[in-house]
Image (cartoon, helix red, strand yellow):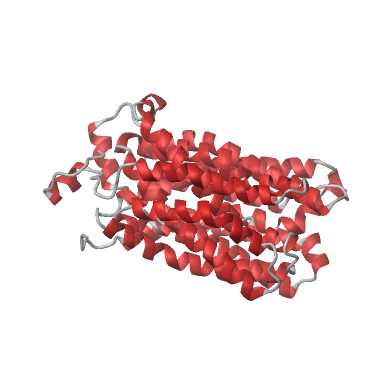
Amino acid sequence: MSKARVPWKAVIGGSIGNMVEWYDWFVYSSFAIYFAASFFPEGNDTAKLLNTAAIFAVGFFMRPLGGWLLGRYADRRGRKAALTLTVTLMSASALLIAIAPTYEAVGYFGALVLVVARLLQGLSVGGEYAASATYLTEATPRGRRGFASSFQYVSMTAGQLVGLGLQIILQNTMSKEALSSYGWRIPFVVGALAAAVVFYLRRNLLETEAYDEEEREHAKGRGTIRALLGHKKEALLVIALTMGGTVAYYTYTTYLTKYLSNTAGLPKETATLVSFCALFIFMCLQPLAGGLSDRIGRRPLLITFGIGSMLGTVPLMTALGGVQGFGGGLVLSLIGLVIVTGYTSINAVVKAELFPTNVRALGVALPYAIANALFGGTAEYVALWFKDSGIESGFFWYVSGCAAVSLVVYLTMRETRDAALSRTELVTQGESVPTRV
């Protein structure tokens, strides 16, 4: 493995905004158990969660549009410009949720405000993933890309942890009545303010060498659908390899707290603490797995995830549904998240390594956003639908089936670890390696 230095300024700059993006994205789901009643009439608790989960899924269906628009923007205007724009959109959407009126005050208009905010979030996150993945990958030398790009999920998980940590603080300092009345608005105000800070930080980032090189040599055709259609195989590959990973990821992260509370019957505070501790360990594992992929390749980690998720989801989720305390919930959740690490730690770099510079951001953004809209965004809703229908175990088999499809892709795809992402990188290494410029 190359001993090239990791550009920490670029890694931190590319990641910190991602943390705020996913903090805002995650707190909607984690605080839904408190604000669901504020936007819908009295009724069955699961039905209220279904309604808020449906609005959560709406944001995912906006992600393909965000992936197209902002992926094109990143390829034509630069990675730095796209990163700045996405965090601006996320700040606006968080503020909109924070001030949304309740059902008691304006009827279903409050739910409509939530939908609009989720549409903005979906637009933003649809572009953020690709801009961040592309920036982190291009800004790091070959031989260190797996390690550096793993910080995308470090930052995503850190955002979730901040959200969960704030939830724990609020749970222990406010009554349930106060949380359900107005306390749930606090994290969205925090998210809007944090995004404003990140906007300033991202303005000081340097553009990547790979993009600057592409901008000088190819002024036309960057970031277009026509250019992407020249890489149809790679685009379909991104959709297929994302399918199993995104379903498993959202199952063991955003859905986990509600599952432990709504199915296992753990107190909300205990379920939240389980998620917090499991996610913290999960976050620490990402650079270790990313660094390992720089040594042994990306495919071995993806294959390990595919096998583990296909065979382990049903017994793990069944056992989680019957846990009676913090310890059992934490151990079982960690097993699931360790398996998922085989996907999360390297999925960003693998996708970026598949495409040339002129269409790299769009190539990562649009297929990934489509896969998330179809599978990731609907995971929570599908899970609650199965539960409401009285066949909750059907969801576990659904997750296993998605993992099985992706496993086939992992077994047949080419290794991407040694791809050169710029002409400068190829020349300085003086080697004959797969070129993605």
Residue 160, picture quadrant: bottom right
State the quadrant of the C terminus. top left
Give the residue displayed 23% in from the left and 43% down from the top.
422
Indicate left or right for 280 with 295 as reference: right
Q: Position of residue 276 (x, y in %)?
A: 59, 68
Give the residue displayed 14% in from the left and 44% down from the top.
432
Considering depth in this image, is 37 or 173 the residue closer to the camera? 37
Give the residue displayed 77% in from the left and 60% down from the top.
182
Residue furthest to the left in view is 430
Image position of 261 with respect to 383: above or below = below
Task: Count the numbered circles shown.
Answer: 0
Q: Position of residue 301 (x, y in %)?
A: 38, 55
Image position of 269 with respect to 103: above or below = below
Q: Position of residue 349 (x, y in %)?
A: 36, 49
Considering depth in this image, is 172 or 84 the residue closer to the camera? 172
Indicate left or right for 185 with 164 as reference: right
State the quadrant of the N terminus. bottom left
Indicate left or right for 311 with 146 as reference: right
Give the residue displayed 53% in from the left and 65% down from the top.
335
Residue 228 visible to the viewer: yes
Residue 165, picture quadrant: bottom right
